[in-house]
Image: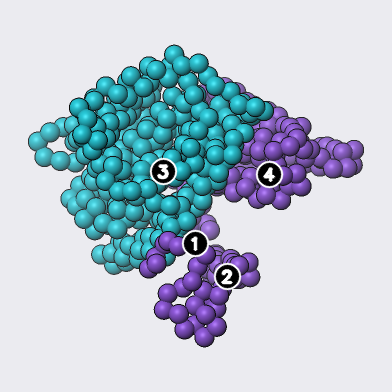
Chain colours: A purple, B cyan
Amino acid sequence: MIPVWRDVLFWVCAVLAVVTGIAVFRVDSMARATFALLASFVFAAGTVMLLDLPYLGVLVILMMIMEMVVMAVFMIMYMMNPAGLMPMTMVHNPKGSLAIAVGTFVLLATGVLLVPWPSSQAPKPEDPTMQLGEALMGDKMLVMIVLGLALFATMVATVVLATHRGRYDRYGDRLERKRPQDPSRGGLGR
Amino acid sequence: MVEQTPWWGGLLLPLVLVVFALAAASFDSVLAAKAAGAPRDFARPLRSAAGLLVQQRRGTLAADSLLWRAGGVALLIAAVLASAATPLGDWVVGDMSVGVVWFNAMEVVAWAAVWLVGWGANSAFGLVAGYRFVAQGLAYELPHMFALITAAVGAGSLRIGDIVAAQDGLWFVVWMPVAFVVYLLSVLGMAFFRPFDQATGADAAGGVLAELSGVDRLVFVAGRWLLLVSGAAMAVPLFLGGGHGPLLPGWTWSLVKTAAVLALLVWAGRRFPTIRVDRLQEIAWMVLIPATLLQALFVSVVVVWG
């Protein structure tokens, strides 16, 4: 790609990511706030793709769409007004949070500009996705396996704790029923 | 062997998809007419589209028009972009090194799009149906991803061109039949097409379609058909050998195979009754996910030791 276009695309993505990020706190509906945040993530993914990291960029888009849709469901569910259809605000303690947000942004931006970033003379890898996979899965394989197990155990534990009806509700106190008794029929074997 | 087309390939892609979508909709209407004992009606999709174009938009009280319209437009655009990675014979619009992930990311847009269209109308039926689709997404998406991963593992690459090249001798459908079937099921699910059409179910007055009218409805329904076409077209390079085939040139084989997969999906939609989302949820997690995991394990073992 011509370097000029790269610059143009970067600035378009960067500015829109910040603008939609600000919109999250300016809109008056939870649905709009959620999808403004999604737009912000998608534009951020655009800048990642400009770094020739297509796998990470596309993955950010993929994961963020799924996450934001699920988040919209939960955010609207937990809102204090019925069904989240009434106007709302995302901001609490406006002055304090604004000061913290601007302070953090200035701090990080100054850091980005002041840090002497290393420049590498090494040629770009043929396939950065492969290199990333080897970096993560090569000598860190044990860590990744343990992490995976821990995450999986957490998920199972959360579901077990959160489930409304366990097997004793479904199959009886002595697990004597052949077929589970469920409030709604359907699915497997019923 | 799969090569990127010049820039105008991107302009041709939507046209090809629209032709396929119209043909599929026409076939669907013929099947419907046959089931009803009515005379065959090839032109119904075109007539409906023309009717929607001139229809005046209906509004609802306190609708979130921005999100409502954004949902339909996002579905349409994502359906076309999903096919950017799909090769037609030897040509592909975007020869991406992560084509499989790109396709996956674009069809996941349907989650957001359908929920937004359901939400935007400020109608109870639309809202219920939007949530139904998110639940359906949680059912079909994991088996779908495992099916995609299985094809990528078989070729050892996320590039669609490499996956096609790996099927030079043996099509993936032969040794990944489970992944292929699950993929087709999930395509029907992601396009909320019958029998997974509870998001537009008659039991909820049309669901997300309940309040959609005029151009908005046309955009959304067209997006749904294009998504179905995109999904069917991607089954060809992933499992059916892409443009590989005797005698005929590659692009003809791609078209023929895509048409066959699409016809099968539309026929299945007319053949089977709607499956409730909660029922699908249990089937997906208890049957489809373990089945696709075993399929992925089998393919991984073959790739490592084969």
Q: Is residue A53 left or right of residue B230?
A: right
Spot the residue most to the top: B54
Residue at which label 4 appears: A83
Residue at which label 3 appears: B197
Helix, strand or loop for disc 3 = loop
Spot the residue most to the left: B247
Residue at which label 1 appears: A184
Q: CA distance from mark 4 to mark 2?
A: 25 Å
Residue B297: in sight, yes or no? no
Q: CA distance from mark 2 to mark 1?
A: 12 Å
Three-letter code, disc 4? Ala
Subunit of mark 2? A
Helix, strand or loop for disc 4 = helix
Q: CA distance from mark 4 to mark 3?
A: 24 Å
First in sequence: mark 2 vs mark 1: 2
Residue at figure coordinates x 48%, y 37% from the top left: B205
Helix, strand or loop for disc 2 = loop
Three-letter code, disc 3? Asp
The C terminus of chain A lies in which quarter of the figure?
Answer: bottom left
Residue A159, quarter of picture: bottom right
Subunit of mark 3? B
Residue A44, quarter of picture: top right
Using the rendered image, report if marks 4 and 2 lie on a common chain: yes
Using the rendered image, report if marks 3 and 2 lie on a common chain: no
Residue at figure coordinates x 51%, y 28% from the top left: B212
Q: Which mark is residue A165?
A: 2
Q: Which mark is residue A48?
A: none
Three-letter code, disc 1? Ser
Three-letter code, disc 2? Arg
Using the rendered image, report if marks 4 and 1 lie on a common chain: yes
First in sequence: mark 4 vs mark 1: 4
